[in-house]
Image: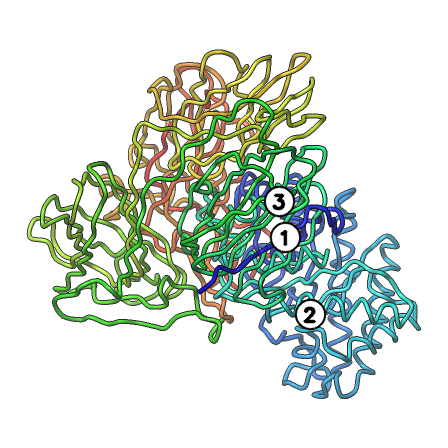
């Protein structure tokens, strides 16, 4: 089959880059979940979330997320006012429609009055008074106004909109009100707009949902713009504030198709909330790690300049090759994001007049790593200098993966020497359904998500394998072949549903890996919030060139037997270069305050900065160096680390995403690249088991099989009397990281398809000074332990660190949540590791 062609025309600019596709519905749980670096590095413009103190879902309270979201560069918080209520359809109290509406109107008054206390931050709030009114308050169901859909008779809905709009504007004349927030752009919305114009109650932002396909985004935005012209209104801002399905979310090759449509339409849009709050709609892993989808949005958010025309082989057709591109004339840099099909494609970039006779082309792959699988930065596939012929270059590509997205960055090829980055090493994927299974209990499951079944989750190959569970003698064998001797990383993509009975009893499902029948090791397969959501468990092995058999078994004669129940999706093998660190080019960094690209480097005037989004596999020391000339200051995740110079710095990096910024302190700083290498063991690190601390009240040492040494501390919380205090020692005064190993399995019953786990928190006090509240995301089970690092200031010598917790009250400071959606407890604490930040 002939290769398809995607053409980028740098000579046809289509407007300033907007970046609107990065919005999120319920994607922020609270300050720290996800971390500030993860939110900022995804360039999230808008968030739609619940009313403050709402009982629709745990977390994501509008006024609690507002300050940190704005501090992370966010623009607008869309406040879903009906989410103050329970249930969906919304269960608004009252015997009649009039009573229900009157009570809800009073709630709206209270919500606006709360926002008015937020000072300047209130300008970032957009009120959404009704959500999907056709299926809720003005539909034909049990909880509707009068059992008659507004599609049939809109009078009650239109009157309610008019009155609520005027109430909000009366309380806050500067307020922005969004609507109609329908689940699609119904034809009746045109009538709503006509009514709103006639009564001077037009929304400040037009909102609807596109739980459909990217082609509908383009079609419906164009249709809405036609209505505006016909009615003589606008143009008004648009937020498609719920988009994409389970099958699309987490998959870069799917999401680039939505991004292309949304960016082309120059609207804002928020990814839909199908699962858990606080993970940016299956973009963030734990609190501070990124999956493939996050890195796609990181690349999208770093586009600058103007968008340019992109002609896809099948324009505006979902599940085909699509793309978005920008040209930044000042940087002399073009970026193209594309994906959505497998096999071969030609990427043609024309009208390269700005670039000279040659271009430097970097091609990266952003692979799918599962909904819950952490990912390193995008893989570099090729980097080369290409001749510009007749004003264009053509990149013939083969082996494209429809689940991956790809980034092409072009810059002039004749400016300075090119120091190409080494390409990604050898890697192969092996589907579990193609492996050999022996023993009992086998099942081939699926198909999972597909274009015909978008409510299910994306799964590699569409199928997965079960059988490794309590009591099984099953063995899943992968026959592999590797090109040379070396160290290989094995990634097992798997899932153990946290509420399945064998998993609920024990926690992570353990299986046993061998290579050619030797070197047994136990692997804990990842837990998930639903069946068939995927993370990965990684381990390293030494392999010789040639064929091998890798087995996953439910029993091992040396190590024991499986407890739990897991399904396996695939196995990846990756050849590791153990000598190589990571290099980040300054010419591709996020530049600010006058910084500019100069050939393969960045030039920073005094106060100018370059920001690098740096991946670390684990919490701990790394070696960070700067290749360049001049004076600068290095900050990591907002913490000042030290002056840059000839010597590399030993720096603490958090596992996952780190924001590393270099700011010029002299007249000019030339930066070529940032390097990140392994630890040199220069930062003194000490781990303190929680059970060795001082316990108060209900805090107690409890057995957990996967805690360090089999013990951890439970029962912290429900008031400051129930506490843990550790004495830790610092060999120097200053900023340190507390890396806390913890578990949190709290999950009250849900009334929705959303699982609704709860973030626990700890109130941490160091040496009796100010207390800091830290949120800890769910680990899906109390016997499943993760790490979270918190920066604190320690004095030289002994320091006391105390952990307590109590339930946070509502905004009024007195009332409390009645549905178990605000935890009164700290997580289970296993250990605390202390490391200087630099």
Secondary structure, mark 3, is strand
**Disc 2: which residue:** 131
Q: Nearer the viewer, mark 1 or mark 2?
A: 2
Image coords of residue 155 (percent x, y): 83, 83
| Residue 356 in view of the camera | yes
**Which quadrant of the structure image shows residue 400?**
bottom left
Contact between labelled residues 2 and 3, with CB atoms less than 8 Å apart: no
**Which quadrant of the structure image shows residue 126?**
bottom right
The residues tagged by marks 1 and 2 sit, at their Cα atoms, a distance apart of 28 Å
Q: Is residue 570 left or right of residue 61?
A: left
Neighbor class of circle 2 (other Cα within 10 Å; few <14, some 14-19, many 20+) is: many
Instruction: Answer with mark 3 or mark 1, whichever residue precedes in sequence.
Output: 3
**Disc 1: which residue:** 814
| Residue 718 in view of the camera | no
Q: Is residue 632 left or right of residue 491?
A: right
Q: Nearer the viewer, mark 3 or mark 1?
A: 3
Q: Is residue 450 left or right of residue 491?
A: right
**Residue at (71, 68) in percent of width and height:** 181
**Residue at (81, 56) in percent of width and height:** 176
Q: Nearer the viewer, mark 3 or mark 2?
A: 3
Image coords of residue 286 (percent x, y): 44, 47
Q: Nearer the viewer, residue 413 or 29?
A: 413
Secondary structure, mark 2, is loop
Secondary structure, mark 1, is loop
Image coords of residue 265 (percent x, y): 71, 59
On residue 392, the disc is: 3
Q: Is residue 417 above or below residue 460?
A: above
**Residue at (68, 63) in percent of width and height:** 240
**Residue at (61, 54) in percent of width and height:** 7
């Amino acid at each position: 089959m002939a290769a398809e062609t995607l053409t980028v025309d740098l000579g046809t600019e289509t407007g300033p880059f907007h970046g609107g596709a990065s919005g999120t519905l319920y994607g922020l749980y609270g300050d720290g979940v996800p971390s500030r670096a993860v939110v900022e590095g995804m360039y999230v413009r808008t968030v739609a979330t619940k009313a403050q103190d709402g009982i629709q879902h745990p977390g994501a309270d509008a006024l609690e997320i507002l300050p940190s979201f704005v501090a992370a560069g966010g623009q607008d918080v869309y406040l879903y006012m009906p989410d103050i209520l329970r249930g969906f359809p919304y269960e608004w109290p009252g015997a009649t429609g009039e009573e229900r509406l009157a009570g809800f109107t009073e709630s709206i008054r209270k919500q606006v009055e709360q926002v008015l206390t937020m000072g300047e931050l209130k300008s970032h709030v957009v009120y959404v008074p009704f959500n999907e009114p056709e299926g809720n308050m003005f539909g034909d169901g049990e909880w509707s106004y009068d059992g008659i859909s507004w599609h049939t008779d809109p009078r009650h809905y239109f009157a309610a909109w008019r009155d609520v709009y005027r109430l909000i504007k009366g309380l806050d004349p500067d307020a922005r009100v969004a609507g109609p927030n329908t689940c699609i752009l119904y034809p009746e919305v045109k009538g709503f707009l006509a009514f709103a114009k006639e009564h001077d109650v037009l929304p400040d932002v037009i909102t609807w949902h596109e739980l459909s396909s990217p082609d509908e985004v383009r079609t419906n935005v164009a249709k809405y713009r036609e209505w505006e012209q016909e009615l003589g209104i606008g143009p008004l801002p648009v937020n498609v504030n719920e988009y994409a399905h389970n099958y699309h979310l987490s998959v870069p090759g799917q999401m680039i198709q939505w991004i292309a449509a949304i960016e082309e339409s120059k609207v804002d849009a928020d990814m839909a909330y199908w699962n858990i709050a606080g993970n940016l709609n299956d973009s963030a892993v734990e609190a501070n790690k990124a999956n493939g989808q996050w890195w796609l949005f990181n690349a999208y958010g770093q586009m600058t300049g103007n968008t340019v025309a992109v002609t896809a082989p099948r324009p505006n057709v979902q599940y085909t090759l699509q793309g978005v591109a920008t040209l930044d004339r000042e940087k002399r840099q073009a970026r193209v994001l594309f994906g959505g099909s497998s096999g071969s494609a030609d990427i043609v970039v024309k009208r390269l007049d700005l670039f000279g006779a040659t271009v430097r082309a970097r091609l990266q792959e952003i692979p799918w790593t599962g909904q819950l699988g952490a990912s390193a930065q995008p893989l570099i596939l090729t980097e080369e200098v290409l001749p510009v012929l007749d004003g264009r270059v053509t990149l013939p590509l083969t082996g494209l993966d429809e689940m991956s997205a790809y980034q092409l960055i072009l810059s002039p090829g004749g400016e300075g020497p090119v120091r190409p980055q080494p390409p990604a090493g050898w890697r192969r994927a092996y589907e579990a359904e193609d492996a050999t299974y022996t023993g009992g209990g086998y099942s081939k499951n699926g198909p999972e998500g597909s274009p015909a079944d978008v409510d299910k989750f994306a799964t590699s190959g569409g199928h997965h394998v079960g059988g490794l569970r309590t009591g099984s003698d099953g063995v899943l064998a992968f026959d592999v072949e590797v090109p040379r001797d070396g160290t290989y990383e094995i990634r097992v993509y798997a899932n153990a549903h946290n509420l399945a009975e064998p998993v609920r009893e024990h926690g992570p499902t353990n299986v046993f890996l061998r290579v050619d029948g030797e070197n047994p090791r136990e692997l804990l397969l990842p837990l998930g919030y639903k069946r068939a959501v995927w993370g990965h468990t990684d381990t390293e092995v030494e392999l010789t060139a040639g064929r091998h058999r890798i087995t996953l078994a439910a029993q091992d004669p040396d190590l024991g037997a499986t407890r739990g129940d897991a399904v396996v999706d695939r196995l990846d093998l990756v050849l590791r270069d153990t000598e190589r660190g990571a290099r980040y080019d300054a010419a591709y960094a996020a530049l600010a305050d006058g910084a500019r690209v100069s050939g393969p480097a960045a030039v920073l005037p005094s106060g100018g900065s370059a920001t690098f989004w740096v991946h670390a596999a684990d919490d701990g020391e790394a070696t960070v160096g700067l290749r360049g000339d001049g004076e600068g200051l290095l900050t990591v995740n907002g913490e000042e680390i030290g002056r840059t110079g000839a010597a590399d710095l030993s720096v603490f990096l958090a596992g996952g995403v780190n924001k590393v910024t270099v700011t010029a302190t002299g007249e000019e700083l030339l930066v070529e690249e940032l390097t990140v290498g392994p630890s040199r063991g220069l930062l003194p690190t000490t781990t303190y088991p929680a059970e060795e601390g001082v316990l108060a009240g209900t805090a107690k040492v409890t057995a957990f099989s996967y805690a360090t040494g089999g013990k951890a501390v439970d029962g912290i919380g429900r008031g400051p009397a129930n506490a843990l205090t550790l004495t830790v020692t610092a060999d120097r005064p200053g900023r340190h990281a507390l890396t806390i190993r913890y578990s949190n399995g709290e999950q009250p019953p849900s009334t929705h398809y959303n699982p609704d786990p709860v973030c626990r928190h700890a109130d941490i006090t160091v040496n009796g000074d100010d207390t800091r509240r830290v949120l800890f995301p769910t680990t899906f089970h109390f016997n499943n332990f993760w790490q979270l690092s918190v920066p604190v200031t320690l004095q030289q010598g002994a320091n006391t660190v105390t952990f307590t917790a109590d339930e946070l009250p509502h905004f009024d400071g007195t009332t409390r949540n009645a549905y178990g959606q605000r935890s009164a407890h700290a997580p289970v604490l296993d250990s605390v590791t202390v490391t200087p930040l630099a």
